[in-house]
Amino acid sequence: MKENKVYIETYGCQMNLADTELIMGILKDHGYGLTQEIDDADVVLLNTCSIRDNAEQRIYGRLGNLKTIKNSNPNLVVGVLGCMAERLRKDLVEEKKIVDLVVGPDEYRRMPEFIDLAFHGEKGIGVRLSKTETYDDIIPYREDGLSAWISVMRGCDKFCTFCVVPFTRGRERSRSLKSIVDEIKLLSDRGFKEITLLGQNVNSYLDGENDFADLLAASAKVDRTMRIRFTTSHPQDLSDKLLYTIREHGNICKSIHLPVQSGSNRILELMNRTYSIEHYLTIIEKARELMEEISFTTDIISGFPTETEKDHKLTLDVMKKVRYDGAYMFKYSPREGTKAFKMNDDVTEEIKSVRLQEIIQLQQKISYEINQTLVGKEQIVLIDGFSKKSDQFLAGRTDTNKVVVIPKDGKIKPGDYIRVKINRATQATLFGNAAINSEINPNSMALTA
Ligand code: SAH
Ligand code: SF4
Ligand code: F3S
């Protein structure tokens, strides 16, 4: 019998990228082949995101393109997975006739069954959310490489008033520490060099007695030549124990993504973020006392309902106080079903745009200034491949997750840790040269340097 081939496109956050690997693992186990060519596929799946309206509009656009492909190949099965599947459910198959499958994040085990139904001309819909599903026992399908994501928990219980995630991903639940550590071991044996532990709020990870700091420590011990990263941390749950753990282990990256969303306590309260700016700044201060080189990135929303010029200025103030290494910056987008959706979206599109531009410009200036302070200094870089712009250059990342570009050198290959002396910097990239005798003995704890 001919092997059916599946093609998947992934949108949204890293959790979706990790889920795509999980889905590929499940489908491969059931005899499906994978393809990178859409024209070669019997099944086309879109793993979708609902976080802002423009994310969903992109998917509608893509479904429009797929319609043309399906017209010339009527047997093609088209599936919508992920957060949009969960949010729109049946509406998707009713409105978009070309959609055969709608499968939410907690029903991926049943993908083979749903695809079978679709091959027999029936619609497959699986959108139940689960309190317990963590896919603990499933090994995701990953190409060989250097970096891998591992979901350590699913769902979110925070209910920030602007956010669809608690509705699309359901309640918070953690995977077992043992299964995560075992997966890291497998990846270490395959030559992976960097692991990112993922969750919407990793700080509320809990497996029996073990909290997220324990999980980080256990992950770091598996292979000291592997870098361990994690995202996202919610400011309310970031403990001192976690900061001490990050400091203690040379291979846990000194880089924290800590979304602030707004600098105004009034807006934070309306957002149900459950911390004050004062508390937020205390965490940053503590972390910097403990670790000189730690970097911070953040998420910011501009134009949340009732946001005034004064609130906006407070956001700019916080950015100046913290001096983030980088930020993801968004215009508020009302999402049906959330609490904020019932508030009046009273900041005009024009004002949202002006404020967002001010936020972006300030961040670019700060990122540029921070990067200039690294010129003349040495950084330890994990080389991960060629530079995006030219194959005459190699690129990698620092512990603090900054991109570094160096001239190609026959001796240096992806997967190597090298010392790089930085000689130039833009707001997004550092440029430098490998320092002499730069290779780092992977068996020493040299990553702490
Ligand atoms: N769990 C993570 C974030 C997940 S969503 C956390 O709590 O930090 C990523 C980011 O998208 C959020 O931090 C927020 O800045 C942004 N976001 C979420 N909902 C949004 C909305 N309705 N409009 C605009 N931005 C939004
Ligand atoms: Fe959304 Fe808030 Fe949960 Fe993050 S913590 S996923 S912003 S509800
Ligand atoms: Fe989007 Fe769902 Fe992630 S809404 S940001 S794909 S959790």
Image (cartoon, helix red, strand yellow):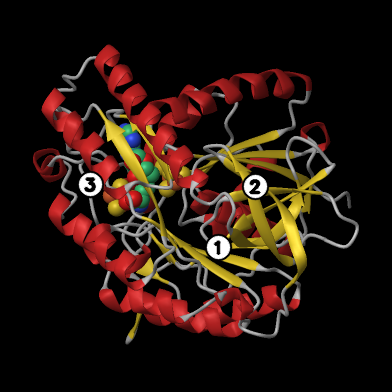
In the picture, measured across the screen, residue 330 lies left or right of residue 195, that is left
Residue wearing tag 2: 423
For disc 1, the neighbor class at 10 Å (few under 14, some 14 to 19, many from 20) is many
Which tag, 1 or 2, sits closer to the chain's start? Answer: 1
* Residue farthest top in this picture: 350
- Report how far apart the C-alphas of labels 1 and 2 lie in the structure: 18 Å
- Report how far apart the C-alphas of labels 1 and 3 lie in the structure: 30 Å
Task: For mark 2, give the secondary structure.
Answer: strand
Question: Residue at the spot x=68%, y=73% of the render?
Answer: 187
Residue 399 is labelled as 1
Task: For mark 3, give the secondary structure.
Answer: loop
Queried on whether the Cβ of the residue with tag 2 lies below 8 angstroms from ligand 1, the answer reads no
Q: Amino acid at mark 3?
A: Cys
Residue 160 is labelled as 3
Q: Is residue 109 above or below residue 364?
A: below
In the picture, measured across the screen, residue 130 lies left or right of residue 414, that is left
Q: Amino acid at mark 2?
A: Asn
Task: For mark 1, give the secondary structure.
Answer: loop
Queried on whether the Cβ of the residue with tag 3 lies below 8 angstroms from ligand 2, the answer reads yes
Question: Residue at the spot x=70%, y=85% of the render?
Answer: 443
Question: Residue at the spot x=45%, y=29% of the render?
Answer: 56
Where, by quadrant of the figure, is residue 416 drawn? bottom right
For disc 2, the neighbor class at 10 Å (few under 14, some 14 to 19, many from 20) is some
* Residue farthest front in this picture: 376
In the picture, measured across the screen, residue 335 lies left or right of residue 435, that is left
For disc 3, the neighbor class at 10 Å (few under 14, some 14 to 19, many from 20) is many
Q: How many marks?
A: 3
